Image (cartoon, rainbow, N blue to C red):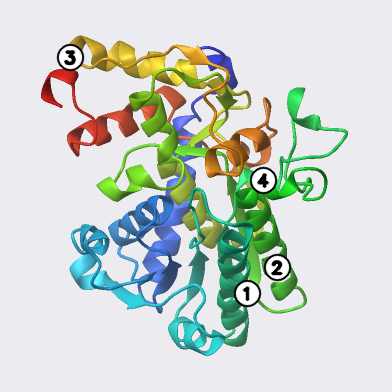
Protein backbone atom coordinates (compact mmCIF):
# COMPACT_ATOMS: atom_id res chain seq x y z
CA UNK A 1 0.00 0.00 0.00
CA UNK A 2 1.63 3.25 -1.10
CA UNK A 3 2.27 5.69 1.71
CA UNK A 4 1.60 2.97 4.25
CA UNK A 5 3.85 4.79 6.67
CA UNK A 6 0.98 7.27 7.15
CA UNK A 7 -0.83 4.57 9.12
CA UNK A 8 0.36 2.65 12.14
CA UNK A 9 -1.53 0.23 14.33
CA UNK A 10 -2.05 1.47 17.87
CA UNK A 11 -0.15 -0.38 20.60
CA UNK A 12 -2.27 -3.28 21.86
CA UNK A 13 -2.12 -1.95 25.40
CA UNK A 14 -3.49 1.46 24.41
CA UNK A 15 -6.32 -0.06 22.39
CA UNK A 16 -7.14 -2.33 25.34
CA UNK A 17 -7.45 0.70 27.62
CA UNK A 18 -9.97 2.22 25.22
CA UNK A 19 -11.92 -1.05 25.15
CA UNK A 20 -11.90 -1.18 28.95
CA UNK A 21 -13.25 2.36 29.15
CA UNK A 22 -16.07 1.49 26.74
CA UNK A 23 -16.82 -1.72 28.63
CA UNK A 24 -17.09 0.11 31.96
CA UNK A 25 -19.41 2.70 30.47
CA UNK A 26 -21.53 -0.01 28.83
CA UNK A 27 -21.97 -1.86 32.12
CA UNK A 28 -23.51 1.27 33.61
CA UNK A 29 -25.40 2.22 30.44
CA UNK A 30 -27.07 -1.18 30.39
CA UNK A 31 -28.90 -0.16 33.56
CA UNK A 32 -29.99 3.22 32.16
CA UNK A 33 -32.43 4.28 29.48
CA UNK A 34 -31.80 3.39 25.84
CA UNK A 35 -29.34 5.21 23.63
CA UNK A 36 -31.19 6.94 20.80
CA UNK A 37 -29.65 6.15 17.41
CA UNK A 38 -31.14 8.10 14.50
CA UNK A 39 -30.98 6.70 10.98
CA UNK A 40 -30.39 3.20 12.31
CA UNK A 41 -30.34 1.51 8.89
CA UNK A 42 -27.36 3.57 7.71
CA UNK A 43 -23.89 2.22 7.03
CA UNK A 44 -22.24 3.83 10.07
CA UNK A 45 -25.34 3.61 12.26
CA UNK A 46 -25.75 -0.13 11.72
CA UNK A 47 -22.22 -0.70 13.00
CA UNK A 48 -22.90 1.54 15.99
CA UNK A 49 -26.05 -0.47 16.73
CA UNK A 50 -24.16 -3.74 16.40
CA UNK A 51 -21.42 -2.63 18.80
CA UNK A 52 -23.86 -1.21 21.36
CA UNK A 53 -25.92 -4.40 21.32
CA UNK A 54 -22.77 -6.50 21.75
CA UNK A 55 -22.04 -4.49 24.88
CA UNK A 56 -25.54 -5.15 26.21
CA UNK A 57 -26.72 -1.54 25.78
CA UNK A 58 -30.36 -0.87 24.93
CA UNK A 59 -30.85 0.96 21.62
CA UNK A 60 -33.82 2.96 20.39
CA UNK A 61 -33.28 3.25 16.65
CA UNK A 62 -35.19 5.51 14.30
CA UNK A 63 -36.14 4.50 10.76
CA UNK A 64 -38.30 6.06 8.08
CA UNK A 65 -40.51 3.02 7.61
CA UNK A 66 -40.81 0.15 10.07
CA UNK A 67 -42.17 -2.11 7.33
CA UNK A 68 -39.48 -1.40 4.76
CA UNK A 69 -37.48 -4.51 3.79
CA UNK A 70 -34.21 -2.68 4.42
CA UNK A 71 -34.92 -2.56 8.17
CA UNK A 72 -35.15 -6.34 8.52
CA UNK A 73 -31.41 -6.87 9.01
CA UNK A 74 -31.49 -4.81 12.21
CA UNK A 75 -33.71 -7.38 13.89
CA UNK A 76 -31.14 -10.07 13.07
CA UNK A 77 -28.26 -8.33 14.82
CA UNK A 78 -27.02 -10.28 17.87
CA UNK A 79 -28.85 -8.98 20.93
CA UNK A 80 -31.51 -7.18 18.91
CA UNK A 81 -34.54 -9.21 20.09
CA UNK A 82 -33.96 -8.11 23.69
CA UNK A 83 -32.23 -4.77 23.35
CA UNK A 84 -33.34 -3.06 20.12
CA UNK A 85 -36.51 -1.00 19.75
CA UNK A 86 -37.24 0.66 16.41
CA UNK A 87 -39.32 3.81 16.04
CA UNK A 88 -40.71 5.19 12.79
CA UNK A 89 -40.04 8.89 12.24
CA UNK A 90 -38.83 11.14 9.43
CA UNK A 91 -36.10 13.77 9.74
CA UNK A 92 -38.66 16.40 8.76
CA UNK A 93 -41.19 15.31 11.39
CA UNK A 94 -42.50 18.07 13.68
CA UNK A 95 -40.25 18.85 16.69
CA UNK A 96 -42.94 17.55 19.05
CA UNK A 97 -42.64 14.09 17.50
CA UNK A 98 -38.89 14.09 18.02
CA UNK A 99 -39.39 15.16 21.62
CA UNK A 100 -41.54 12.06 22.16
CA UNK A 101 -38.85 9.84 20.63
CA UNK A 102 -36.05 11.33 22.74
CA UNK A 103 -37.98 11.11 26.00
CA UNK A 104 -36.57 8.47 28.34
CA UNK A 105 -33.26 8.06 26.49
CA UNK A 106 -29.92 8.30 28.26
CA UNK A 107 -27.92 9.67 25.30
CA UNK A 108 -28.40 10.63 21.65
CA UNK A 109 -26.36 9.56 18.62
CA UNK A 110 -27.59 11.53 15.62
CA UNK A 111 -26.34 9.87 12.44
CA UNK A 112 -29.34 10.41 10.14
CA UNK A 113 -28.70 12.72 7.18
CA UNK A 114 -29.64 12.68 3.49
CA UNK A 115 -27.12 10.99 1.20
CA UNK A 116 -28.40 11.05 -2.36
CA UNK A 117 -27.13 11.80 -5.84
CA UNK A 118 -28.65 14.12 -8.41
CA UNK A 119 -30.97 16.01 -6.05
CA UNK A 120 -31.38 19.72 -5.42
CA UNK A 121 -29.49 21.73 -2.83
CA UNK A 122 -32.72 22.15 -0.86
CA UNK A 123 -33.29 18.38 -0.72
CA UNK A 124 -29.93 17.99 1.00
CA UNK A 125 -29.90 21.04 3.24
CA UNK A 126 -33.42 21.11 4.64
CA UNK A 127 -33.57 17.57 6.09
CA UNK A 128 -29.97 17.78 7.33
CA UNK A 129 -30.41 21.11 9.12
CA UNK A 130 -34.01 20.66 10.24
CA UNK A 131 -33.29 17.11 11.39
CA UNK A 132 -30.27 18.15 13.46
CA UNK A 133 -32.24 21.07 14.88
CA UNK A 134 -35.20 18.91 15.92
CA UNK A 135 -33.12 16.11 17.41
CA UNK A 136 -30.68 18.32 19.30
CA UNK A 137 -33.45 20.64 20.52
CA UNK A 138 -35.40 17.65 21.83
CA UNK A 139 -32.27 16.39 23.59
CA UNK A 140 -31.76 19.75 25.27
CA UNK A 141 -35.42 19.94 26.31
CA UNK A 142 -35.24 16.50 27.96
CA UNK A 143 -31.96 17.23 29.69
CA UNK A 144 -29.87 14.70 27.77
CA UNK A 145 -26.33 15.02 29.08
CA UNK A 146 -24.45 14.00 25.95
CA UNK A 147 -25.14 13.94 22.21
CA UNK A 148 -22.89 12.75 19.41
CA UNK A 149 -23.37 14.02 15.86
CA UNK A 150 -22.12 12.24 12.75
CA UNK A 151 -20.82 15.02 10.52
CA UNK A 152 -18.19 14.74 7.77
CA UNK A 153 -14.82 15.92 6.60
CA UNK A 154 -16.93 17.82 4.07
CA UNK A 155 -17.71 20.36 6.81
CA UNK A 156 -13.99 20.94 7.39
CA UNK A 157 -11.97 20.70 4.21
CA UNK A 158 -13.80 22.36 1.33
CA UNK A 159 -13.00 25.72 -0.28
CA UNK A 160 -11.00 28.79 0.60
CA UNK A 161 -8.41 30.83 -1.30
CA UNK A 162 -5.58 29.84 1.04
CA UNK A 163 -6.39 26.17 0.83
CA UNK A 164 -4.36 24.05 3.30
CA UNK A 165 -5.43 20.76 1.75
CA UNK A 166 -2.42 20.15 -0.51
CA UNK A 167 0.43 20.34 2.01
CA UNK A 168 1.02 18.62 5.36
CA UNK A 169 -0.28 18.44 7.96
CA UNK A 170 -3.51 19.48 6.20
CA UNK A 171 -6.73 20.85 7.71
CA UNK A 172 -7.68 19.99 11.28
CA UNK A 173 -10.82 20.27 13.39
CA UNK A 174 -10.26 24.01 13.85
CA UNK A 175 -11.20 24.66 10.23
CA UNK A 176 -14.66 25.02 8.65
CA UNK A 177 -15.53 24.55 5.00
CA UNK A 178 -16.04 27.69 2.94
CA UNK A 179 -19.54 27.64 1.47
CA UNK A 180 -19.43 30.83 -0.57
CA UNK A 181 -17.88 31.40 -3.97
CA UNK A 182 -18.35 30.28 -7.59
CA UNK A 183 -20.07 26.96 -8.12
CA UNK A 184 -20.76 26.52 -4.41
CA UNK A 185 -24.18 25.02 -5.08
CA UNK A 186 -22.53 22.21 -7.03
CA UNK A 187 -21.54 20.74 -3.68
CA UNK A 188 -24.83 20.16 -1.83
CA UNK A 189 -23.47 17.43 0.43
CA UNK A 190 -20.68 19.65 1.79
CA UNK A 191 -23.10 22.51 2.32
CA UNK A 192 -25.68 20.34 4.09
CA UNK A 193 -23.15 18.75 6.44
CA UNK A 194 -21.55 22.09 7.31
CA UNK A 195 -24.83 23.88 7.99
CA UNK A 196 -26.22 20.97 10.00
CA UNK A 197 -23.14 20.80 12.20
CA UNK A 198 -23.15 24.55 12.79
CA UNK A 199 -26.82 24.35 13.77
CA UNK A 200 -26.06 21.58 16.27
CA UNK A 201 -23.34 23.61 17.98
CA UNK A 202 -25.65 26.63 18.23
CA UNK A 203 -28.43 24.60 19.81
CA UNK A 204 -26.35 23.14 22.64
CA UNK A 205 -24.46 26.36 23.40
CA UNK A 206 -25.12 27.49 26.96
CA UNK A 207 -27.15 24.39 27.84
CA UNK A 208 -26.44 21.38 30.03
CA UNK A 209 -26.16 19.14 26.97
CA UNK A 210 -22.63 18.31 25.79
CA UNK A 211 -21.96 17.72 22.09
CA UNK A 212 -19.27 15.68 20.37
CA UNK A 213 -18.97 15.72 16.59
CA UNK A 214 -17.38 12.93 14.55
CA UNK A 215 -16.12 14.10 11.14
CA UNK A 216 -15.23 11.00 9.09
CA UNK A 217 -13.37 10.90 5.82
CA UNK A 218 -14.28 8.22 3.25
CA UNK A 219 -15.82 5.44 5.35
CA UNK A 220 -14.98 1.92 4.22
CA UNK A 221 -15.24 -1.53 5.73
CA UNK A 222 -17.62 -4.48 5.83
CA UNK A 223 -21.26 -4.11 4.81
CA UNK A 224 -23.78 -5.35 7.36
CA UNK A 225 -26.59 -5.20 4.79
CA UNK A 226 -26.54 -5.12 0.96
CA UNK A 227 -28.43 -1.81 0.95
CA UNK A 228 -25.27 -0.07 2.20
CA UNK A 229 -23.72 -0.70 -1.20
CA UNK A 230 -26.06 1.88 -2.69
CA UNK A 231 -25.63 4.70 -0.19
CA UNK A 232 -22.97 6.78 1.45
CA UNK A 233 -19.29 6.12 0.95
CA UNK A 234 -19.92 2.55 -0.18
CA UNK A 235 -20.66 3.93 -3.65
CA UNK A 236 -16.97 4.61 -4.08
CA UNK A 237 -16.09 0.98 -3.74
CA UNK A 238 -18.95 0.11 -6.04
CA UNK A 239 -17.36 2.44 -8.54
CA UNK A 240 -13.87 1.01 -8.05
CA UNK A 241 -15.12 -2.54 -8.49
CA UNK A 242 -17.57 -2.07 -11.35
CA UNK A 243 -16.45 0.82 -13.53
CA UNK A 244 -13.81 0.94 -16.26
CA UNK A 245 -11.86 3.16 -16.13
CA UNK A 246 -11.87 4.49 -12.58
CA UNK A 247 -11.45 8.10 -11.43
CA UNK A 248 -7.94 9.47 -11.20
CA UNK A 249 -8.52 10.82 -7.72
CA UNK A 250 -7.33 10.35 -4.16
CA UNK A 251 -9.14 10.23 -0.84
CA UNK A 252 -8.31 9.68 2.79
CA UNK A 253 -10.26 6.89 4.47
CA UNK A 254 -11.32 5.37 7.79
CA UNK A 255 -12.81 2.02 8.76
CA UNK A 256 -16.51 2.02 9.61
CA UNK A 257 -15.85 -0.07 12.73
CA UNK A 258 -13.48 2.57 14.08
CA UNK A 259 -15.99 5.33 13.26
CA UNK A 260 -18.70 3.44 15.15
CA UNK A 261 -16.32 2.85 18.03
CA UNK A 262 -15.60 6.59 18.13
CA UNK A 263 -19.27 7.41 18.68
CA UNK A 264 -19.45 5.02 21.60
CA UNK A 265 -16.12 6.15 23.04
CA UNK A 266 -17.42 9.73 22.98
CA UNK A 267 -20.14 8.67 25.43
CA UNK A 268 -17.72 6.57 27.47
CA UNK A 269 -15.06 9.30 27.72
CA UNK A 270 -16.92 12.60 28.11
CA UNK A 271 -13.98 14.38 29.75
CA UNK A 272 -12.00 14.03 26.51
CA UNK A 273 -14.85 14.27 24.01
CA UNK A 274 -17.39 16.83 25.23
CA UNK A 275 -17.30 19.99 23.15
CA UNK A 276 -14.88 18.45 20.64
CA UNK A 277 -14.82 17.77 16.91
CA UNK A 278 -12.87 14.70 15.81
CA UNK A 279 -11.61 14.49 12.25
CA UNK A 280 -11.45 10.73 11.76
CA UNK A 281 -9.03 9.29 9.23
CA UNK A 282 -6.93 6.14 9.41
CA UNK A 283 -4.39 7.75 7.08
CA UNK A 284 -2.73 11.14 7.24
CA UNK A 285 -2.13 11.07 3.48
CA UNK A 286 -4.57 10.26 0.70
CA UNK A 287 -4.87 6.96 -1.15
CA UNK A 288 -5.76 6.83 -4.85
CA UNK A 289 -8.70 4.97 -6.30
CA UNK A 290 -6.19 3.06 -8.40
CA UNK A 291 -4.57 1.84 -5.17
CA UNK A 292 -7.98 0.68 -3.90
CA UNK A 293 -8.51 -1.28 -7.07
CA UNK A 294 -5.03 -2.79 -7.07
CA UNK A 295 -5.52 -4.06 -3.53
CA UNK A 296 -8.86 -5.62 -4.51
CA UNK A 297 -7.58 -7.01 -7.82
CA UNK A 298 -4.56 -8.58 -6.17
CA UNK A 299 -6.81 -10.51 -3.81
CA UNK A 300 -9.81 -11.34 -5.99
CA UNK A 301 -8.74 -11.43 -9.66
CA UNK A 302 -7.05 -14.82 -9.16
CA UNK A 303 -10.50 -16.07 -8.11
CA UNK A 304 -12.07 -15.15 -11.45
CA UNK A 305 -12.92 -11.47 -10.95
CA UNK A 306 -11.77 -8.77 -13.34
CA UNK A 307 -11.26 -5.61 -11.36
CA UNK A 308 -9.65 -2.78 -13.31
CA UNK A 309 -7.32 -0.10 -11.97
CA UNK A 310 -6.96 2.04 -15.08
CA UNK A 311 -7.03 5.76 -14.32
CA UNK A 312 -9.27 8.23 -16.12
CA UNK A 313 -9.11 11.91 -15.17
CA UNK A 314 -12.59 12.44 -16.67
CA UNK A 315 -14.32 9.65 -14.71
CA UNK A 316 -15.14 11.67 -11.64
CA UNK A 317 -18.88 12.19 -11.92
CA UNK A 318 -21.19 14.88 -13.13
CA UNK A 319 -21.30 18.27 -11.50
CA UNK A 320 -23.50 18.52 -8.45
CA UNK A 321 -23.58 14.84 -7.56
CA UNK A 322 -22.31 13.39 -4.30
CA UNK A 323 -19.16 11.92 -5.85
CA UNK A 324 -18.08 15.22 -7.38
CA UNK A 325 -18.83 17.05 -4.14
CA UNK A 326 -16.82 14.65 -2.04
CA UNK A 327 -13.86 14.53 -4.41
CA UNK A 328 -13.71 18.33 -4.52
CA UNK A 329 -13.69 18.44 -0.72
CA UNK A 330 -11.09 15.75 -0.31
CA UNK A 331 -7.68 16.91 0.89
CA UNK A 332 -4.37 15.29 0.05
CA UNK A 333 -3.39 15.55 3.72
CA UNK A 334 -5.48 15.57 6.89
CA UNK A 335 -4.40 16.42 10.41
CA UNK A 336 -6.26 13.65 12.22
CA UNK A 337 -3.71 13.34 15.00
CA UNK A 338 -6.13 14.32 17.77
CA UNK A 339 -8.48 11.46 16.87
CA UNK A 340 -5.69 8.95 16.30
CA UNK A 341 -4.27 9.65 19.75
CA UNK A 342 -7.70 9.38 21.36
CA UNK A 343 -9.43 6.40 19.76
CA UNK A 344 -6.40 4.35 18.63
CA UNK A 345 -7.02 2.95 15.16
CA UNK A 346 -7.55 -0.80 15.10
CA UNK A 347 -8.11 -1.53 11.39
CA UNK A 348 -5.49 -0.72 8.71
CA UNK A 349 -6.66 0.69 5.36
CA UNK A 350 -5.89 -2.39 3.26
CA UNK A 351 -7.91 -4.56 5.63
CA UNK A 352 -10.81 -2.11 5.45
CA UNK A 353 -10.80 -2.08 1.67
CA UNK A 354 -10.71 -5.86 1.41
CA UNK A 355 -13.42 -6.26 4.06
CA UNK A 356 -15.78 -4.07 2.06
CA UNK A 357 -15.00 -5.91 -1.17
CA UNK A 358 -15.41 -9.33 0.43
CA UNK A 359 -18.73 -8.44 2.04
CA UNK A 360 -20.03 -7.12 -1.29
CA UNK A 361 -19.01 -10.35 -2.97
CA UNK A 362 -20.61 -12.44 -0.21
CA UNK A 363 -23.87 -10.53 -0.66
CA UNK A 364 -23.76 -11.29 -4.38
CA UNK A 365 -23.43 -7.62 -5.26
CA UNK A 366 -20.31 -8.25 -7.32
CA UNK A 367 -19.78 -11.44 -9.32
CA UNK A 368 -17.07 -12.81 -11.60
CA UNK A 369 -17.81 -12.15 -15.31
CA UNK A 370 -18.64 -15.82 -15.91
CA UNK A 371 -21.47 -15.62 -13.37
CA UNK A 372 -23.11 -12.40 -14.48
Give the CA separation, mark 1 to mark 4. 24 Å
The numbered mark, 2 or 3, whose residue comes first in the sequence reads: 2
Q: Kindly identify which residue carries mark 2.
A: 199
**Residue 219 percent location from the top left of the image:** 47, 40
Q: Are marks 1 and 2 in contact (CB under 8 Å)?
A: yes
Tag on residue 133? 1
**Helix, strand or loop at disc 3?**
helix
**Which residue is pictured at 63% across the width and 27% down the height?**
284
Tag on residue 320? none
Question: In the picture shown, does residue 77 fall above or below 92?
Answer: above
Give the CA separation, mark 2 to mark 3. 49 Å
Q: Are marks 3 and 1 in contact (CB under 8 Å)?
A: no
Q: Are marks 2 and 4 in contact (CB under 8 Å)?
A: no
Q: Residues within 10 Å of mark 4 (few under 14, many from 20)?
A: some
The numbered mark, 3 or 1, whose residue comes first in the sequence reads: 1
The foreground one among 46 and 297 is 297
Q: Is residue 125 left or right of residue 355?
A: right
Q: Kindly identify which residue carries mark 4.
A: 186
**Residue 356 percent location from the top left of the image:** 33, 33
Q: Kindly identify which residue carries mark 3.
A: 303
Give the CA separation, mark 1 to mark 2. 6 Å
**Residue 366 percent location from the top left of the image:** 24, 30
Q: Are marks 1 and 4 in contact (CB under 8 Å)?
A: no
**Which residue is pictured at 82% across the width and 32% down the height?**
163
The foreground one among 256 and 166 is 166
The numbered mark, 2 or 4, whose residue comes first in the sequence reads: 4
Amino acid sequence: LRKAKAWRRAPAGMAALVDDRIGLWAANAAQAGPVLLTGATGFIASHIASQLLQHGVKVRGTVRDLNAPKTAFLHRLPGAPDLLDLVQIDLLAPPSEWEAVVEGCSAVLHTASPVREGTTLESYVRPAVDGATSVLSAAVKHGIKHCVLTASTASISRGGEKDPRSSPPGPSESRWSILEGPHAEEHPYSISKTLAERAAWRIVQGTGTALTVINPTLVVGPLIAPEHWETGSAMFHRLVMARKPIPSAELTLVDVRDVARSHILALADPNASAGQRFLTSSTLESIGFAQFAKIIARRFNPLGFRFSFEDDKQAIGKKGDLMNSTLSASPKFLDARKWLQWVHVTVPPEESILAMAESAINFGLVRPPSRL
